[in-house]
């Protein structure tokens, strides 16, 4: 447990302390909370947390602390949590709780976390452990220096706060007696700092709040300075310290400590102040501190002793001196830490270059002497690199990369591999690690794979391009071909299709088809994919059939599987057909037997999407579940096909009308695997818009920031076109539809299949505008919008049957709706067109057929088929009410009211309900014919209603009738209809 050591008085933080004390009180009563404590270096975060920890311990809470450590560009996965677990393991009270979570115990013992499934079990295990500990006694978990946290620790913190330990029970009551306080340096967070997006995400959670420690007021700094010195201080000294401290408590303390140096002045920079205080120590203590600074913020006693080469007695004297001067503080497990990171940084910066390199080398060798523990590889790599022993740094970086891969930390693996790549050219060839795949080009290919696994697809492309530049120096033509087809595959993942086809063509041409080789087969398999993407289907079929024969001849079963998938997609009726899906099943079995997880996940994705495209929505879910499970076990959840499956899973739930489940699944996905972009957010955006939450449009726009991403552009295009249509913005809907199609059109000039859906969405807004203008008598304006409708429909019709292959049930349904909306825009509602649209969506979709039923009911009313209109309107209303689709629920209720499709409630008004409807339209300046069209009655009937209104109100004209109605309060003043 944390040893609370408080030496400095807490001044000027009453409000913050009250707020954090309230968090502790709520935690003790069973309401779990988290606070992110931000502030510049030295502003007093640690001192405030010390005070809070002291109060928590006094109140009987268990206090656990974990610290993040600066290891430069590399990180030690889960370090602060490993520190917490180490403290727990030393306390017998918590032995049973630890034993209940073996995944946690494996991390503590240095074992591998494994694939993403193991990663999830680890996350859930730590969450469960903390919950259990809070049952034993109220718990305070403090994590310091998050700005140095490795990505795995950041991911784990995200899980704990968004799902694991702050979650509420089904009844909404918090269940854990737990508080989490996490500090970070706000002034360290540059724009690209990896902690920034996590903080932005966490502060939106209901159980998380942010507390910023701002600089202290001058009066508070003066009080602090005087309280630190027993004797009197001259006023001018206090004033000077206050000026120089600029509200920073640590600066003030250090400036005060330096006043006794005897040099008659105060240094201008904090580093100078720290070094003056440091130089007041004995030579032995200074030597010890220089050595400790090289180790990092914290150092173990035994490691420091061996590195500094002092006797035990000399070391203890030096430590006592440094602790007395408040430069070091004792920590847990026989360790020592600099009281503040700035003190360590100042001492470290003052080292001579040779001295620094020598000490780093000493620590590296000491760590090596303890055996090549995998968890220490990152530290050894850091020390060897800083000691300029580049060969050993290279070997340790590769070892650290292997460790990161085993514990399910692909981002750390990538960083270590990139560190190795940086070192490679500086290491003599004879000193470089040897073995298959360890060469420079091989490392680049491995790093590109790690980048793809983390979802960093553009980085994967960059690394493979670098491999291509390096492979020019290689004599191995097979390696050169492998680099090219790998680059082609990565380029396809970022939709650079023409370049991908060019590189796959080069790869295939570099090696002969005879005699057969595994490299040629895989080059061919990649070329088949690239050819299909650029519309070269004949080439794809020819090469696939040839390569499949070669793969069978060689017994390369995973390549067989990959080629079978391509043939299932390209040949005949594609993956929607029974034959295509049977071929995909065979491919899945071949991939499984070969152990090639990426190919197996590709087969499972195509089985899932093929089943979906065939209109068998429920049947696609088991394939999705199997595919994601396989990807999870292989650590591939962030690679392209599993990402597509994650999106498809949510899309199926959305389409089936399981909206709440869809939103929950999207949220859960984000907690465990946040890097999903449009794949995760899309269906949740569609739900939010249907439910009237138009802030979803703002979230959609954020997808368009940063480098171009095809999926993000598609999702944002759908959401923003839909938002504009639902809000009656015809111009915005048309503009968004056109811009989205333009940006998604491929290098061959072929628009995306989503063009049909986008056209239907935009056409609904266009039809609304054309109808409105006709009702106002603006035939010219209505005609212009009818022409726009035709322009939108033409590409949708062309895409519905592209390359001679018709789209599946979903695509045909969107085309039917687009045709019906076009007819509504050009000539008015058409019963047959909307009947066809309703029927077309009858493949398991819930929301879209209800939308079509709303328009169908409208058309039936216009055709005076009231009984059928009542049935359709009621059916649509039931779906909208069940889904919570408030926007269209209001529209269908308005249709029911205007069309009198249900009994009107009794009214005490002078006018009947129908006469009130007519009166409202009179107030808008409508003619009798326009009133009839809008209320689905004849112009003659509308004229009778107008005459009745004039008689009842005693008015001689329509204008007078409206004026009388306003005076009597029969209608409220309102703006005219949108024009």
Image: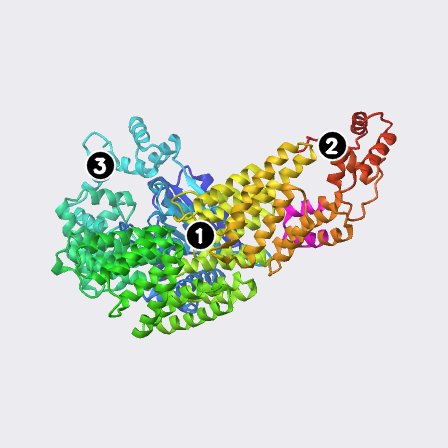
Using the image as rendered, state which of residue 846 and residue 979 is in the foreground.
Answer: 979
| Measured Cα–Cα span from mark 3 to mark 2 | 82 Å
Q: Is residue 742 magenta?
A: no
**Quarter of the view holding residue 707:** top left
Q: Position of residue 404 (x, y in %)?
A: 31, 60
Q: Secondary structure at mark 3?
A: helix
Q: Tell me, yes or no, if residue 722 can be seen here.
A: no
Q: Secondary structure at mark 1?
A: strand
Dot 3 crowding, Cα within 10 Å, few <14, some 14–19, many 20+ = some
Q: Residue tagged by mark 3?
A: 272
Q: Position of residue 31 (x, y in %)?
A: 53, 53
User: Which residues fall within the magenta stretch?
Assistant: 873-893
Mark 1 vs mark 2: which is more N-terminal? 1
Q: Is residue 877 magenta?
A: yes
Mark 1 vs mark 3: which is more N-terminal? 1
Q: Residue tagged by mark 1?
A: 180
Count of labels in the image = 3
Q: Using the image, tell me which numbered label, if any, was put on residue 926.
A: 2
Rendered residue at 42%/40% (across/down): 212
Q: Position of residue 15 (x, y in %)?
A: 47, 39
Dot 1 crowding, Cα within 10 Å, few <14, some 14–19, many 20+ = many
| Measured Cα–Cα span from mark 1 to mark 3 | 36 Å
């Amino acid at each position: 447990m944390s040893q609370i050591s408080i030496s400095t008085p807490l001044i000027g933080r009453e409000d913050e302390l009250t707020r954090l004390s309230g968090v502790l009180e709520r935690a003790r009563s069973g309401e779990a909370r988290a606070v992110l404590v931000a502030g510049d270096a030295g502003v007093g975060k640690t001192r405030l947390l010390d005070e809070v920890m002291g109060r928590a311990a006094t109140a009987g809470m268990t206090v656990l602390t974990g610290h993040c450590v600066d290891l430069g560009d590399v990180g030690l996965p889960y370090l602060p949590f490993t520190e917490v677990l180490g403290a727990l393991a030393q306390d017998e009270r918590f032995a049973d709780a630890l034993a209940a979570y073996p995944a946690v115990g494996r991390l503590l013992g240095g074992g591998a976390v494994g694939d993403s499934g193991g990663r999830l079990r680890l996350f859930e295990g730590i969450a469960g452990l903390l919950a259990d500990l809070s049952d034993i006694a109220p718990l305070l978990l403090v994590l310091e220096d998050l700005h140095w946290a490795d990505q795995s620790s950041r991911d784990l913190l995200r899980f704990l706060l968004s799902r694991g330990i702050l979650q509420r029970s089904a009844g909404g009551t918090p269940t854990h007696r737990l508080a989490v306080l996490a500090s970070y340096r706000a002034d360290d967070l540059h724009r690209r700092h990896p902690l920034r997006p996590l903080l932005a995400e966490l502060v939106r959670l209901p159980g998380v709040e942010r507390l910023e420690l701002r600089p202290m007021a001058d009066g508070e700094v003066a009080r602090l300075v005087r309280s630190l010195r027993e004797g009197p201080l001259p006023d001018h000294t206090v004033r000077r310290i206050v000026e120089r401290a600029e509200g920073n408590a640590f600066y003030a303390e250090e400036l005060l400590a330096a006043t006794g140096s005897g040099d008659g002045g105060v240094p201008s920079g904090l580093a100078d102040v720290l070094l003056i205080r440091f130089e007041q120590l004995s030579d032995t203590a200074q030597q010890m501190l220089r050595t400790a600074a090289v180790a990092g913020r914290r150092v173990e006693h035994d490691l420091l002793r061996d590195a500094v080469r002092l006797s035990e007695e000399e070391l203890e004297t030096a430590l006592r001196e440094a602790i007395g001067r408040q430069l070091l503080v004792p920590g847990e497990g026989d360790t020592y830490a600099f009281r503040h990171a700035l003190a360590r940084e100042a001492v470290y910066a003052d080292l001579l270059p040779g001295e620094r390199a020598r000490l780093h080398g000493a620590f590296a060798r000491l760590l090596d002497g303890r055996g090549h523990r995998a968890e220490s590889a990152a530290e050894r790599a850091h020390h060897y690199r800083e000691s300029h022993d580049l060969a050993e740094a290279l070997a340790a970086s590769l070892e650290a990369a292997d460790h990161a891969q085993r514990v399910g930390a692909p981002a750390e693996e990538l960083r270590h591999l990139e560190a190795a790549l940086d070192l490679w050219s500086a290491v003599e060839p004879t000193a470089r690690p040897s073995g298959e795949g360890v060469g420079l080009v091989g490392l680049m290919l491995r790093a590109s794979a790690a980048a793809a696994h983390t979802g960093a697809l553009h980085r994967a492309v960059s690394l493979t391009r670098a491999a291509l530049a390096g492979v020019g120096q290689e004599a191995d033509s097979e390696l050169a071909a492998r680099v090219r087809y790998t680059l082609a595959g990565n380029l396809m993942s970022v939709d650079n299709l023409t370049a991908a086809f060019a590189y796959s063509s080069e790869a295939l041409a570099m090696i002969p088809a005879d005699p057969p080789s595994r490299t040629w087969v895989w080059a061919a398999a990649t070329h088949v994919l690239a050819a299909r993407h650029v519309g070269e289907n004949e080439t794809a079929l020819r090469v696939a059939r040839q390569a499949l024969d070669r793969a069978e001849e060689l017994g390369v079963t995973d390549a067989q599987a990959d080629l079978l998938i391509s043939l299932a997609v390209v040949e005949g009726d594609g993956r929607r057909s029974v034959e295509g899906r049977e071929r995909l099943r065979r491919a899945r079995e071949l991939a499984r037997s070969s152990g090639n997880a990426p190919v197996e996940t590709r087969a499972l994705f195509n089985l899932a999407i093929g089943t979906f495209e065939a209109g068998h929505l429920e049947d696609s879910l088991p394939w999705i579940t199997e595919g994601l499970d396989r990807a999870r076990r292989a650590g591939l959840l962030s690679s392209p096909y599993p990402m597509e499956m994650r999106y498809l899973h949510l899309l199926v739930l959305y389409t089936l009308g399981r909206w709440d489940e869809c939103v929950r699944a999207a949220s859960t996905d984000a907690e465990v695997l946040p890097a999903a972009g449009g794949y995760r957010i899309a269906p949740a955006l569609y739900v939010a818009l249907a439910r009237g939450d138009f802030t979803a449009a703002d979230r959609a726009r954020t997808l368009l920031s940063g480098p171009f991403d095809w999926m993000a552009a598609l999702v944002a295009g759908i959401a923003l076109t839909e938002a504009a249509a639902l809000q009656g913005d015809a111009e915005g809907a048309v503009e968004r539809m056109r811009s989205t199609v333009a940006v998604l059109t491929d290098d061959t000039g072929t628009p995306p299949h989503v063009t049909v859906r986008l056209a239907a969405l935009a056409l609904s807004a266009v039809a609304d505008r054309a109808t409105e203008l006709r009702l106002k008598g603006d035939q010219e304006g209505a005609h212009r919008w009818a022409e726009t409708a035709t322009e939108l429909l033409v590409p949708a019709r062309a895409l519905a049957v592209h390359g001679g292959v018709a789209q599946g049930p979903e695509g045909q349904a969107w085309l039917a709706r687009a045709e019906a909306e076009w007819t509504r825009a050009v000539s008015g509602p058409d019963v047959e067109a909307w009947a066809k649209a309703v029927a077309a969506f009858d493949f398991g979709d819930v929301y879209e057929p209800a939308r079509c039923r709303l328009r169908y009911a409208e058309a039936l009313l216009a055709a005076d088929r009231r009984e059928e209109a009542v049935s359709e309107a009621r059916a649509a209303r039931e779906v909208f009410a069940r889904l919570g689709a408030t926007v269209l629920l209001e529209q269908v209720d308005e249709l029911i009211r205007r069309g009198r499709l249900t009994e009107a409630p009794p009214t005490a008004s002078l006018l009947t309900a129908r006469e009130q409807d007519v009166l409202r339209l009179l107030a808008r300046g409508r003619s009798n014919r326009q009133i009839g069209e809008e209320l689905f009655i004849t112009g003659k009937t509308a004229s009778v209603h107008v005459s009745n209104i004039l008689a009842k109100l005693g008015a001689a004209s329509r204008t007078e009738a409206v004026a009388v109605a306003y005076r009597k309060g029969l209608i409220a003043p309102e703006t005219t209809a949108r024009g």
